[in-house]
Image (tube, helix red, strand yellow):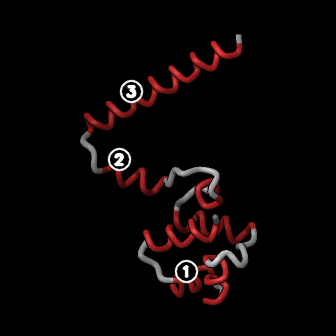
Amino acid sequence: MIGERLKEIRKDRGDTQSDLAKKVNVSLSTVKSWEGGHSEPCHSMLVTICRMYHVSSDFLLGLSDVDPLFLAKTHSQLTDEDQKFMHFFEEFLLYKGSKESNRQKR
């Protein structure tokens, strides 16, 4: 999962494998190995990659399907009024979810 996500993120940001290797000071073969699923970056390298590409570790590890940079780009294309509407809708869904959760606990 890490390799697939890393490749996706890298390409979305317009970097080649060689660009990524240079940015994080590893060999090109190391990046190819990560993206091919033959090995994984160490913990400190994951942190470096997440900070560099502005993604959460949960997204990179496949624990979440939410890419913060994609959301930021998408939201920036909305009007202020649409952004407010989305915020209210999000609050409604969270409220609705908490009500349903409370009902199931009873």
Residue type (three-letter) at the residue carrying disc 3:
Phe
Pick the front one: 31 or 80: 31
**Horizontal placement of 23 versus 45: left or right?**
left
Residue 50 horizontal/vertical position (percent) = 60, 63
Pick the front one: 79 or 92: 92
User: Which residue corresponds to the image point at 64% horizontal and 52% vertical from the top-left?
Assistant: 63
Q: Locate the C terminus and report the quarter of the image it occupies.
A: top right
Classify 59 as above or below 100: below
The residue wearing badge 3 is: 88
Measured Cα–Cα span from mark 3 to mark 1: 39 Å
Residue 71 horizontal/vertical position (percent) = 42, 50
In which quadrant of the rendered view does residue 42 lie? bottom right
The residue wearing badge 1 is: 20
Residue type (three-letter) at the residue carrying disc 2:
His
Characterize the local packing of mark 2: few (<14), some (14-19) or many (20 or more) Cα atoms within 10 angstroms. some
The residue wearing badge 2 is: 75
Q: Locate the N terminus and report the quarter of the image it occupies.
A: bottom right
Residue 76 horizontal/vertical position (percent) = 32, 50
Precedes in sequence: disc 3 or disc 1: 1
Classify 75 as above or below 24: above
Pick the front one: 104 or 21: 104
Precedes in sequence: disc 3 or disc 2: 2
